[in-house]
Image (tube, rainbow, N blue to C red):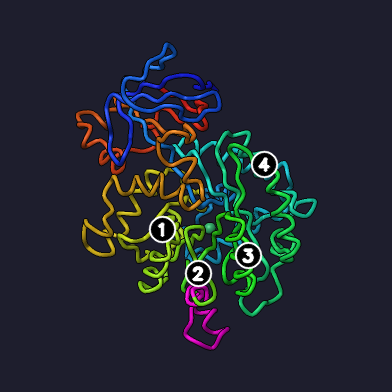
Amino acid sequence: MISLSNSIICPKLVWIGDKFQEGISIRIDSDGNIAEIGKGICGTDKVIWSNEALIPGFVNTHSHAFHRHLRGRSEIGDESGDTFWRWRDNMYGLVDEIDWETMKRLCKSTFQEMINAGITTVGEFHYVHHGEKRFDLDSAVIEAAREAGIRMCLLTTLYQRAGFDTPTPHPIQKKRFISDYDEFLSHVRSLKALENETISIGVAAHSARAVPFEKITSLWEWANDERVPFHIHLEEQPKECVDCQKYLGTKETPMDLILKSIVPNQLFTGVHNTYTSEENMSKLAKLGANVSICPCTEGYLGDGIPKISTKTHLSFGTDCNNRICFLEEIRWAAFTQHVKHNSRNVAGLSASRLMHYATIGGARSLNLEDKVGSFELGKAFDFVSFSLNSPLLDGLQSDELIDGIVFSTGNREISKVGVQGKLLVDSK
Ligand SMILES: [Zn+2]
């Protein structure tokens, strides 16, 4: 790992203001933050990257890092492996015997894969809390992120029940996930002491299925008062909406009820919102709330395609991490909409718009807009760089390059990745 502190980075192209610009240099201070950015920066410690196109690091707003270790067990195409619920049972098998060391090892290798994919910040939606002691596994995830060098917002997650009508929980849910609300909140307060330059703490309610509505409301109000991000899985599967309606005896869905009881704002992120109505998507957008979609996982699990519009405050997540390639997430966000609408112009998802959602959109969802998502004075120097020597990008002009990167490249074209001024990947 090489520190770029106190250097002046001079790449061929830098992504600023939703376009590539030539001749821009970036001076990094001793803490890995941007001290100066622009043309004609003078100094002796220049690092010349004459064949590199620099983009702010990707911000992954939804991950369950340990799920990556279910890779190879998709059961796609198998008659018995047809549903999300079967996949969930496999996942429960993975955490049955988990302890602190194992959780750290599983998460660390996933975070390292993310860094190789240009992801410099992850929102880790973490609900497997209890190993040998109550909540001891949360610190394993933090240690994994620290050792891997990735920036993380740990979205520590409240999980309280097995379903709307509170059936007897699965033994794994009881052993690893479930906690009392007051116990959970006191744990979150203690986690805040572990925040530092690259680790921040947010909260999540697992889902309307796993957390009663009054506790979703209480946790949201706490998060809003404390100004920390709040995430929740919403309407990913039709079953969630049907179970909710059956339980209530009305036609209301989880999103209807949430919009009735709270006023989401920029600190709120709905994850998936696959079956959320256009009307409710529009309400979320007007209130400034974010939506995190995970196109590769949604395809992997057979979820569906959300109703996004030009107004949606969008970001992307790698969720189950079966394949960690943010460029695939980005372009499949567009491709799924194209296929659904039989059009190549849906919700304004151009390459530069998609890149905006992958960077500043993600930062917004994790309440890290002041720190990451763009190259600006005072922000951390988190970046992903593409080699212009790559045969895949050969012959593209600078105004065509973002289109080429978004729709044609993969992890192999990523040449450098850095977090907080530290160069973590340098392959070319
Ligand atoms: Zn998820």
Residue at position x 50%, y 79% from top? 242
Q: Which mark is residue 263?
A: 2
Pick out the residue farthest to the bottom: 249
Percent x, y for residue 59? 46, 44
Residue 299 numbered mark, or none: 1
Q: Please tell me which of labels 4 and 2 falls first in the chain.
A: 4
Secondary structure mostly taken by the magenta-highlighted segment of the chain: helix
Which element carries disc 4, helix, strand or loop? helix
**Is residue 178 covered in magenta?**
no
Q: Is residue 240 visible?
A: no
Rate crowding at label 2 as few (under 14), some (14 to 19) or many (20 or more) other CA atoms within 10 Å.
some
Question: Percent position (x, y) of residue 173?
Answer: 69, 64
Residue at the spot 38% in from the left edge and 30% down from the top edge = 385
- Secondary structure at numbered mark 3: helix
Residue that carries the numbered disc 3 in the rendered image: 219
Judged from this view, the residue extending furthest toward the top is 44
Q: What residue range appears in magenta?
A: 240-259
**Of the image marks 2 and 1, the number of the one nearer the N terminus:** 2
Badge 3 or badge 2: first in the primary sequence: 3
Foreground label between 3 and 4: 3
